[in-house]
Image (cartoon, rainbow, N blue to C red):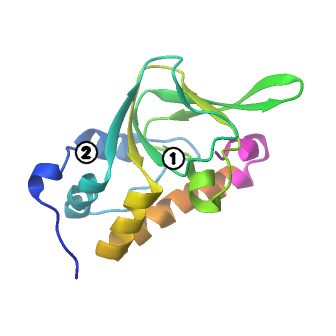
Amino acid sequence: MNAVLPSSNKLDLQGLIHAIAQANADDSMNNPLKPEQWDTLSAYLQPCSLAAGQLLFSQGASDRTLYLVESGSLSVHYEDEKGRLRMAIVPAGSVVGEGGFFSHRPRSATVQAAAPSKLWALTALRFTELSNRQPGIALSLAMAAGAVLSKRLGNRRRRVAST
């Protein structure tokens, strides 16, 4: 049964939808959903705001949350024994956290806000609920995030930036 959650739990994702439509980076996410599907998905997402310089997650963390970037930009750093190397800037209209989301492995890099940023978080638990209640939406979103991961892995310079 595909239960629809009450409309009071739905959030306005118009800024995110617009950011995805306007994104032009090589690894931007394509819009995987119809307007009514975004409305349904909103009940599964949690808004998250970061100040410039604020950490989203650290390399090695065991979190599987996928983040959709509505505004701002995020800096991805890989930390090795010699120090910290900036790998990529993730702009609005893309995702971050896709590596841990799919692999169930610790985060491969540290991500922090390069500018004030608004994100939408999809936890592994909420994605499981979405998969059970709205499998078509979950599949479309997973395929779009998987396409971003594939683009990043295909780019040698940004390969380590898959978080």
Q: Which mark is residue 28?
A: 1
Residue 145 position, x and y percent, is 51, 57
Cα gap from disc 1 to disc 2, whole angstroms = 17 Å
In which quadrant of the rendered view does residue 23 lie? top left
Secondary element type, mark 1: loop
Task: Name the N-terminal-most of marks 1 and 2.
Answer: 2
- Mark 1 closeness class: few <14, some 14–19, many ≥20 residues within 10 Å: many
Q: Which residues are magenta?
A: 153-163
**Above or below for 54 versus 158:** above
Q: Which mark is residue 13?
A: 2
Residue 102 position, x and y percent, is 59, 61
Q: Is residue 162 magenta?
A: yes
Q: How would you classify the magenta stretch by its main secondary structure? A: helix
Question: Along the horizontal axis of the image, is 91 left or right of 33?
Answer: right
- Mark 2 closeness class: few <14, some 14–19, many ≥20 residues within 10 Å: some
Amino acid type assigned to the residue bearing label 1 in the image: Ser
Secondary element type, mark 2: loop
Numbered disc total: 2
Residue visible at 43% across and 71% down in the picture: 139
Look at the numbered discs 1 and 2 and tell me whether their residues touch, using CB distance below 8 Å. Answer: no
